Image (cartoon, grey):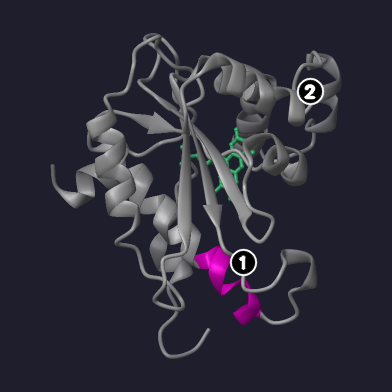
Amino acid sequence: MELKDAIEKRRTVRDFQNRIVPESILDYAIGNGFKAPTYNHQREWDFIVINKLETKLQLIEAEQLNKPVDSHKLEKIFENEESIMKAMYLDAIPKQHKMILEAPTVVVVVYRPKVRVEDAKRIYDLNCLASVWACIENLLLSLAEHEVYGVTFIPQHINVIKAKLGIPDKLEIACIIPVGYKAEGSGMLKQKSVNIYERMHKEKW
Ligand SMILES: Cc1cc2nc3c(=O)[nH]c(=O)nc-3n(C[C@H](O)[C@H](O)[C@H](O)COP(=O)(O)O)c2cc1C
């Protein structure tokens, strides 16, 4: 597959088939993740690969995703928002619990922060986060190459998850990625299209 095909294919998927992702595909994607650019040449990233239901349930509990979502309230919150964004949130929010539970594999991406995010003062302090996201994109593209998809979920209760998974104190979680094959019949949300010539500026804005 050519790079442009993998880029086209990579989409966020939140509905998964009950089908195991071969370890070789995950190894390939994580291996390609490590080829991403990194601010300090260290590639200080780790991946926790979760397949057990009990561990997924620990993540769901830590993130308090067990509560039912009121779709009417949700509709109200987003009623005046831009239509593509609104469609995404209305689809995504009720699926946060199920996507972690039903994905055959969940990958927790861990990185070593330069400074804690809450203490960052300059953009340079966040280079560690920028680098791990370059790694995550390589990973997602490499999964898409094999028809495997993911959704980057940003946890809110990072310290609870760190304690549950035994992640060393000095490291942080960048995101949690439920990974799997797309469920048959599940739709794909519209991707906002951009006219690049409205966004490209020559020499000056
Ligand atoms: C930094 C970042 C955070 C995101 N957080 C979440 C999240 O917490 N839950 C979720 O379901 N999707 C999350 N997403 C996925 C976005 O909703 C998705 O990428 C976006 O709607 C564009 O769709 P596409 O990836 O199919 O192009 C996140 C994506 C990024 C890049």
Please name whichever residue, 176 or 111, is drawn nearer the observer in this view of the structure: 111
**Callout 2 environment at 10 Å: few (<14), some (14 to 19), or many (20+)?**
some
**In this rendering, position of residue 52 left or right of residue 8:** right
In primary-sequence order, the first of circles 1 and 2 is: 2
Q: Main secondary structure of the magenta part?
A: helix
For the question of whether residue 90 can be seen, the reply is: no
* Residue in the picture at 50% in, 44% down: 192
Element type where label 1 sits in the image: loop
- Residue 11, above or below 174: above
Q: Quadrant of residue 11 in the image?
A: top left
Q: Amino acid at mark 1?
A: Pro
Residue 41 lies, with reference to residue 71, above or below; the image says: below
Outermost residue toward the bottom in this view: 203
Residue nearest the viewer, comparing 43 with 37: 43
**Residue 102: which disc?**
none
Q: Which residue is mark 2?
A: 75
Residue 19 vertical placement versus 43 (above, below): above
- For the point 30% across and 43% down, the residue is 29
Of the 4 image quadrants, the one containing the N terminus is: top left
Q: Secondary structure at mark 2?
A: helix
Which residue lies under the disc numbered 1? 113
Residue 82 image point, x, y percent: 68, 41
Tell me what residue is drawn at x 32 percent, y 29 percent: 148
